[in-house]
Amino acid sequence: MSCLSHLIASVCFLLCIVEAHLSTRFLAFFSKGEETPESKVLSVRETLKGKTGCRIVYEYELTLKGFAFDLDHDDSTLSVLETLRNEFNDDEWPLTIEVDSEIHVY
């Protein structure tokens, strides 16, 4: 990844950490969408299913490859987010993690 990509990913991750104290629903999706191998999505999903207090609530399969998930707000929240970032985000298959929020179109 380029320096700018690392910087952007780090800032987004820090925002997730800050907002994790306010929200417990997150989105995790692969930036390359349909091109992403199902095995990558399954690896992330299985890792989350194995974490205490984590529930996958919606799966995206058409243009996005990923899911929405809830995390119990406790000391392990940061650990789960760091695991996703460190184990599954790479140059070939970038993984984006963000806090789920409402979108308004005016």
Image: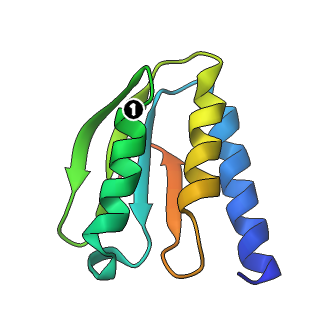
Quick one: label 1, few (<14), some, or many (20+) residues within 10 Å? few
Outermost residue to the top: 74
Which quadrant holds the N terminus? bottom right
**Residue 99 in the image: above or below residue 53:** below
- Specify the color scheme: rainbow
* Picture coordinates of residue 9, whole percent (x, y): 68, 63
Label 1 secondary element: loop
Left or right of 10: which side holds 29?
Answer: left
- The answer, for residue 64, to whether it is visible in the render is no
**Three-letter amino acid code of the residue under disc 1:** Gly
Outermost residue to the left: 62
* Picture coordinates of residue 77, whole percent (x, y): 59, 28
* Picture coordinates of residue 8, whole percent (x, y): 72, 67
Q: Using the rendered view, name the quadrant where residue 105 is placed.
A: bottom left
Point 40% across, 79% down: residue: 32
- The answer, for residue 39, to whether it is visible in the render is yes
* Picture coordinates of residue 6, whole percent (x, y): 75, 70
For label 1, the residue is 50
Which quadrant holds the C terminus? bottom left
Given residues 105 and 26, the one toward you in this image is 26
**Residue 20 in the image: above or below residue 92:** above
Left or right of 20: which side holds 4?
Answer: right
